[in-house]
Image (spheres, grey):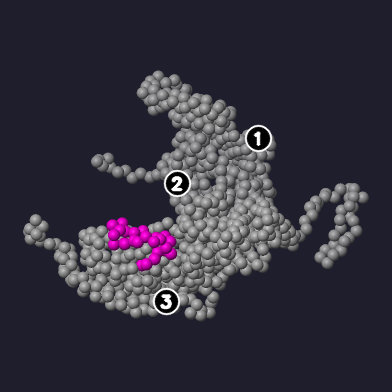
Amino acid sequence: MSKLAGKKRPLDAGEKAILATKKKIKGTDEVLAQVDKLCSLAKKEPARAKTLAELHLPQACREVIEKDADAVLDEVEASLYTVAASILRGEGFSYDVPLRTKGNQMYVPELDRIVLKDACGQRPFANTQTNRKAVITTRVLGLVHELCRKRIHVTKRDLFYTDVKLFQDQLQSDNVLEDVACMLGCTRSSLHVVASEKGVVVGRLTFREDGDLINCQRMGVGGKAVPPNVDKVTEIRSDAMFILLVEKDAAFMRLAEDRFYNTYPCIILTAKGQPDVATRIFLKRLRDVLRIPVLALVDADPYGLKILSVYMKGSMNMSYDSSNLTTPDIKWLGVRPSDLDRFNIPEQCRLPMTDEDIKTGKRLLEEEFVQANPAWVRELEIMVTSKVKAEIQALSSFGFQYLSQVYLPLKLQEGDWI
Amino acid sequence: MGRKADALQQKSPAEFFADNRNIAGFDNPGKCLYTTVRELVENSLDAAEDAGKLPEIDITIEEISQKRLNSIRGISNHDRLDEELYQDHETDEAKKKRLAKEAKELEKLEKAMTKKGEGTAAVDAKRKEIEARRAAAASKATKTFYKITVKDNGTGMPHEDIPGLLGRVLSSTKYGVKQTRGKFGLGAKMALIWSKLSTGLPIEVWSACRKQAFVSYYKLDIDIHKNEPNIHAVRQDANLNHWQGSELSVTILGSWQYYRAKVIRYLRMIAVITPYAQFRFAYRAEDERNSVHFCFVRRTDKMPAPPTETQHHPASVDLELVKRLLAATKAPTLRAFLTREFCNISDVYARRLISEMQAGVDAGTSPRAVSASQATRLHQILHEAKFADPSGSHLSPAGEYNLRLGITKELHPDMVATYQGDARVLDGHAFVVEAAVSVGGRDIKPGINVNRFANRIPLLFEGGSDVITRTAAKRINWASYKINQATDRVGVFVSIVSTKIPYKGAGKEYISDDMEALVGAVKQAIMHCCLQLKSKIARKLVAREQQARRRNLARHVPDAAAAVFRVLRAMADDDEDEDGAMRPPGPKRARLVAAEDLLAPVRRGEVVEATLARKLTEHVERIDTDMGLEYQMQLGAAAGARVAAYLMPRLPQHGYGPPLASAACILRLLQAE
């Protein structure tokens, strides 16, 4: 039937173009040749990235490390013990809390990420400005103590609900939680407090979570939720050649359903928009353990690039923990502004950029991490001057499976990442 | 269809304004009432200020029902024969509907009454709402008329001039380069036209000039077609009380119901900007219970200097004006013409201008001999040449003193700051911006309340795109002056005076927002006021914090004590466990315990949660006392010790004490002998 229909009806120009591009795609091995090269390059890199201490920066910086429950307990107990002693001496109490403000952060080009400087703020109890914060800090320390003793994990929301009257809104308890992590010199996940899961992973990956064997190839179409406490993940194994980082749930679903990872061995990961801490840590772990390249598929708009930058350079809010959260070497596979013309994406799928978009784009152009990569600067300039953006879904205008069957294989085959 | 030839018709100015009443602010009956009051009050203010007297203005609005108006007009009141003929006739169906609706509402009200009890606020409000709706429905059908009488103590009008002054549109004593309230020569005459259109009743005028033995009385209206006064009655009464001033009385169609708030707000605002005037206001309703009267008392006898007439600035004249001035001038030569008719042209400069014209004229040419093309050239050179800006000395702003007094007397704010900017220039016209910002006070809503004044009259309508409103709302960062834009009761008062206010729109109700010089001046004036307030507000906030500090600090003592003690207790319990099943203390804590053992007292029960709470409370109280002391010290250092002092009048039993000499002055205290 279909053959007959194909013969009778002449193809229109668009369909011809699709067919032509489809023909360009060669066998799986040839498609993966470029990826293979990149993979071996990644394996050759030194296993350990440079650390802050090795750099001997003129400025002292603060970084936190992963600590086990006992170490955290000791830190909490020590600081509360000091507080108790100070109260009993009749001196009230006060905390020295590292500042997490923008003025106390800097970008270190050698590490290619944002780190925290070592300025500290006083938080005395007997001061109207800091009184509430000091009390909340005390309360959070107490709660963390309880969690570490019982070795259980709770979400940030749980933590907030233990004393709603004092915390007033979750923003306050969340903020103090980051302060506490910073103050104790450990990562937030060491405090046994996690954010609710947001990321999803699927593909050629097996690991153990709290002893249970997880096979991400047998997770159906929905994929496996990224475990919120990554410290319980062990025995990461995979035969994938690359990790495909996807911005959006929709594209992720398409790839999962088409079993993209079966044809081209890979691990597909998404955080459904702005990445959360757990997904970032998980990506970092995968990359460190498997040592395979990470390719990113994001929208061709400033927001997509912004998300990429959070994976790569870290966010302002979590800069104290940037060493555990950032994966510097991510390749921008698509959808890039230059792709819009290369793949003849029709006009109706391109959106005009708003003033806010253009402003964000121009601001990105001035950022050091973008300037470090001339190819990125070129792409961003195309975006800002053409004032057009497009989402990954724009590719669906050629058919829903265009993304998994044509676009991505072609990109991989040509090694078209920057 | 133009079978009938399009006859060329001419309209008199009065006809034009009768057709386009909205230009002068006579849009609807309510607005007409408001504008009539406003125009008459402003004329009265001008008259009193011209006479150099402190204005005393009585405003009376008398409600007149259709019936009473008919008897005044001499039309008999007829009973309706054919009810269905009338607009407000209610068909049976509509009546049934209305009655059903009313019954339903009544039922609801009764239910609410039995539920909540008679007299609760909600029930009362509901009942009032129903009554108000019924009253509104009833009054919709009947038109109400108002007799507006405004009496002042101003210059009065010469007997012969009265018909011309009031009965001819676009006749004014106020044309010229001078800051005036009225401008068009329209105000009172528009009221006259409106009365003629709506009631047909003539205006009544009483007036007496200074030391005039008689009081002129006129009853007149306006012949709209001819733009001429039409006198009904005229006489001269004996001026027994040596009265000086004018009284105008006009009967118009209006709507007090909808514009009551506007009229009162207008009077309040004019009282703010002219605190040296006294306004007595009375509203007499047909139903005595609805009458209102109040008085805005005079707070000062210091009047701003009256504005003086000035010459045209060269940059502000248009070609037609140049030609008119050339024709009208008394100057014998062109040089004299330039120096006399314009400001900022010196003798030398006039010569330079004339020689620069190169149009065949010299300094000695008679202005009347200047040809049309030469006048055009003169106009051109006047606009191209450089002149000093007009000085603004001819303007008459209200003054910071008066503005502050006016605001204080009407709003009773917690604090006020005022500022008067320098004279600036817009298209050859000088202008001065004055501003006041008040915080707190009576009858003022939370948020930014903008009050606009142009040439010392309040502007109440079309505030949305006005330069003052927009500047206050968009261009001032209130938070940086410690003012909360949403919750603080802020009054912004900005007054612009100029020989030409750059109004926008036909109604002259708002000032355009697109002139940089004006925007800058308004913004600067408001910011200056805010800056003055900032330190005061900051001081107040600190004082408030002083009072609340102890309570605020003590509030969380139980929380902190409980959180700390729980961990302390847990540590103590851990160590007590001798089996080793519990974990040993970490290295950091072990070091701390070795230095000072707190856990033993906890275990012995010597330190409990209450101990921590007590210690914390003691600490907070000590800190609070310290900070309170420090605050008092700073306050003392800044303000010095204050002693209330009183001035006593010197009476016969008082005498001066011995002189007390100091470096600065010699004092002699009053003493009772």
Count all numbered tags in the image, as a single digit.
3
In this orientation, which residue lies closer to the viewer: A59 or B380?
A59
Residue B238 is marked as 1
A413 relative position to B489: left or right: left
The crowd level at tag 3 (other Cα within 10 Å; few <14, some 14-19, many 20+) is few
Q: Residue at x 29, y 62 (%)?
A: A217
- Can residue A208 be seen from the camera position used here? yes
- Please state, as top left, top right, bottom left or bottom right, where the C terminus of chain A lies in the image: bottom left
Please name which of the two marks, 1 or 3, marks the residue nearer to the observer.
3
On whether disc 2 and disc 1 are found on a single subunit, the reply is yes
Q: Which mark is residue A290?
A: none
Respond whether the residues carrying marks 3 and 2 are from the same subunit: no
Of badges 3 and 2, the one in the foreground is: 3
The picture quadrant where one finds residue A211 is bottom left
Question: Disc 3 is attached to a residue of which chain?
Answer: A
Residue depicted at 55% across the width and 27% down the height: B117
Q: Which mark is residue B23?
A: 2
Is any atom of residue B324 visible in this view?
Answer: no
Q: Residue at x 68, y 58 (%)?
A: B601
Q: Which residues are magenta?
A: A209-236
2 and 1 marks in contact (CB < 8 Å): no
Disc 1/disc 3 C-alpha distance (Å): 109 Å
SS for dot 3 = loop
Image quarter hosting the N terminus of chain A: bottom left
Subunit that carries the residue with mark 2 = B
Queried whether the magenta region covers residue B205, the answer comes back as: no
